[in-house]
């Protein structure tokens, strides 16, 4: 095989996560050379196999590339099997390496939905055949045999309309479980007082699964169909694009994309029958997740912990990852592991965009390789060391601030030379336009307890600022951020720290540096404020959380503030 050389990769003018780690620090996410988007699995010898669909001489086929160095270089493509030319186009694949080291490939295939009838008596698993936009999107399956030397031809295993494929697993007992969301018939309110669903609207998609106990020869449809309320009867998919993972106690865990502002979950003892969908504590936009178990047994979750943006009910500007060593009961991390390369540009109006649709694979040496992103120039291939998610401290690097800080959709936020030594960079925030916000957003490792330390200076004429600590991403121009923060510290235009306590209010004098420390404890539901080493009171915890992981700095000047303030340093330590 001819393997490509490692080359420098740039996505537009973006350079992501490439700074050298400090001594003893675990290296964060690293961009890999992008060849093409593929469904990656790890073979028994550690080789990565990337599967994709291409067309040669007018015939669609599945091909594969191979990497022996965790995605740094890839072989030339090799054809695996041909696909049918008849009917609509193919999408996918989703890939699985089974217990016998054979590969299973799953596809979606477009077909005309008009005039269709239920063919379940003919042995095809059928869903609702009403179609979506006049089309069906069926599920097909193919598998290798004889040690991946031959392939069985693809066959349809479910007929109806589904969305994206996001997951497939083989359980310890050999059962293969392929989760998906099926389009269901339209339903109006008031269909009967004996049906709770008649009192609300759950959207057109419901999550379910097909499963096989004979290595994919035959398939059965789960009797469970999981629904979730939507926030609007005009738009909202429902319980969509499920992802599954088997837990150590044998149960299968399903996480579903919803429009409720958080992920929903279901559990199954056998991969066939599922518990009703219930909300988790995981904040999320309307985006699917990625779940993967690393070799040491820990679980890694990839998801968009984003809120309050009109696209995807919260946005997909950044992708987060967290790690669990107790089967998803608790999580550490919530760190940004992908950022939209074009987030500093106005988004497109007619196509999907952002960092969503993560597809992680456990690679060699304990690493995770994952594709994520939607839209031209936005799809990234990245390698992650999960140990990075366990770090408990982070210091802001203002020299690489355009990557570490989100400032898009704002004016007056700059990273400039230090006013005293002229060498180091500082953050300068001024509200230069009355109709534009001035705000910067920074992510750090999540913690239920922790301390955020900043060194800042108010310039003469300063117009006010908000220091917010929260547990999710929202855009820098989110004007409702204070209502969803965990802790808010207001600094008035005269430098007073506004807080709900009696007595004199502490003051930050303009024209000099101050050390501000915010030490929070979500268990005690408070945040202690220290100014220049002096205790100046506490802030109340405003809502329940899994841990703080974001700093938001925003000018609160009502009109303009050409003076603003400077931030020389910011550092977070969490427990």
Image: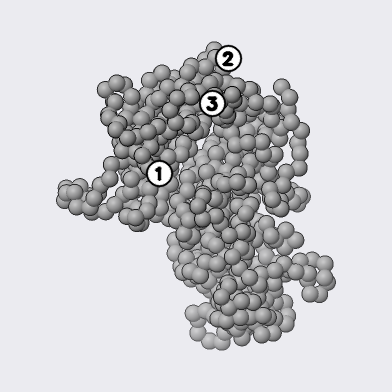
Q: Residues within 10 Å of mark 2 (few under 14, many from 20)?
A: few
Kindly report the distance in space between the C-alpha atoms of the residues bearing marks 3 and 2.
20 Å
First in sequence: mark 3 vs mark 1:
3
How crowded pointer 3 is (Cα within 10 Å; few <14, some 14-19, many 20+) is rated as some
Q: In this figure, which residue is indicated by the disc labeled 3?
A: 60
For the N terminus, which image quadrant?
A: top right
Q: Nearer the viewer, residue 518 or 436?
A: 436
Lower sequence index among marks 1 and 2: 2
In the image: residue 320, left or right of residue 427: left
Q: Say which residue appears at 37% left-offset and 53% top-offset.
A: 235
Nearest to viewer (mark 3 / mark 2): 3
Q: CA distance from mark 3 to mark 1?
A: 28 Å
Q: Which mark is residue 149?
A: 2
Q: Name the element at disc 1.
A: strand
Question: Of the numbered discs in the image, which one, if any, rests on residue 273?
Answer: none
Residue 240, labelled with which disc?
1
Mark 1 to mark 2: distance in Å? 35 Å
Question: 55 or 58: nearer the eye?
Answer: 58
């Amino acid at each position: 095989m001819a393997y490509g050389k490692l080359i420098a990769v740039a996505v537009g003018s973006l350079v992501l996560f490439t700074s050298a780690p400090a001594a003893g620090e675990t290296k964060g996410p690293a961009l890999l050379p992008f060849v093409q988007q593929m469904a990656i699995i790890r073979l028994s010898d550690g080789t990565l196999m990337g599967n994709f669909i291409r067309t040669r001489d007018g015939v669609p086929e599945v091909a594969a590339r191979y990497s022996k160095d965790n995605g740094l270089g890839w072989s030339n493509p090799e054809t695996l099997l041909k696909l049918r030319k008849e009917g609509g186009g193919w999408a996918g694949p989703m890939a699985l390496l089974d217990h016998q080291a054979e590969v299973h490939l799953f596809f979606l295939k477009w077909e005309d939905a008009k005039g269709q009838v239920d063919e379940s008596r003919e042995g095809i698993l059928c869903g609702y055949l009403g179609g979506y936009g006049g089309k069906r999107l069926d599920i097909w399956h193919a598998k290798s045999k004889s040690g991946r030397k031959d392939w069985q031809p693809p066959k349809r295993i479910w007929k109806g309309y589904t969305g994206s494929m996001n997951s497939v697993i083989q359980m310890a007992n050999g059962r293969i479980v392929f989760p998906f969301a099926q389009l269901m018939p339209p339903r109006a309110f008031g269909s009967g007082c004996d049906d709770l669903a008649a009192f609300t609207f759950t959207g057109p998609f419901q999550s379910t699964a097909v499963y096989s106990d004979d290595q994919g020869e035959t398939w059965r449809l789960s009797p469970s169909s999981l629904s979730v309320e939507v926030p609007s009867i005009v738009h909202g998919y429902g319980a969509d694009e499920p992802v599954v993972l088997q837990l150590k106690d044998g149960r299968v865990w399903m996480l579903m994309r919803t429009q409720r502002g958080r992920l929903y979950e279901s559990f199954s003892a056998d991969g066939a029958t599922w518990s009703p969908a219930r909300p988790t504590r995981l904040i999320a936009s309307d985006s699917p997740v990625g779940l993967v178990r690393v070799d040491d047994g820990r679980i890694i979750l990839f998801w968009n912990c984003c809120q309050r943006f009109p696209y995807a009910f919260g946005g997909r500007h950044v992708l987060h990852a967290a790690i669990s060593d107790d089967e998803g009961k608790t999580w550490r991390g919530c760190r940004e592991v992908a950022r939209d390369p074009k987030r500093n540009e106005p988004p497109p109006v007619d196509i999907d965009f952002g960092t969503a649709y993560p597809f992680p694979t456990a690679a060699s040496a304990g690493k995770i390789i994952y594709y994520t992103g939607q839209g031209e120039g936005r799809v990234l291939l990245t390698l992650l060391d999960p140990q990075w998610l366990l770090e408990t401290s982070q210091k802001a690097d203002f020299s690489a601030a355009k990557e570490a800080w989100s400032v898009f959709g704002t004016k007056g936020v700059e990273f400039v030379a230090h006013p005293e030594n002229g060498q180091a960079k500082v953050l300068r925030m001024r509200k230069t336009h009355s109709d534009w916000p001035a705000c910067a957003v920074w992510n750090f490792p999540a913690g239920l307890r922790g301390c955020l330390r900043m060194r800042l200076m108010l310039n003469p004429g300063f117009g006010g600022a908000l220091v917010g600590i929260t547990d999710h991403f929202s855009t820098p121009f989110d004007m409702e951020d204070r209502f969803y923060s965990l802790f808010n510290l207001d600094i008035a235009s005269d430098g007073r720290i506004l807080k709900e306590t009696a007595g004199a209010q502490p003051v930050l004098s303009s024209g000099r540096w101050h050390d501000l420390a915010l030490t929070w404890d979500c268990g005690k539901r408070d945040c202690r404020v220290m100014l220049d080493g002096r205790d100046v009171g506490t802030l109340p915890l405003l809502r329940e959380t899994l841990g703080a992981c974001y700093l938001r700095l925003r000018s609160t000047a009502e009109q303009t503030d050409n003076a603003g303030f400077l931030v020389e340093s910011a550092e977070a330590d969490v427990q």
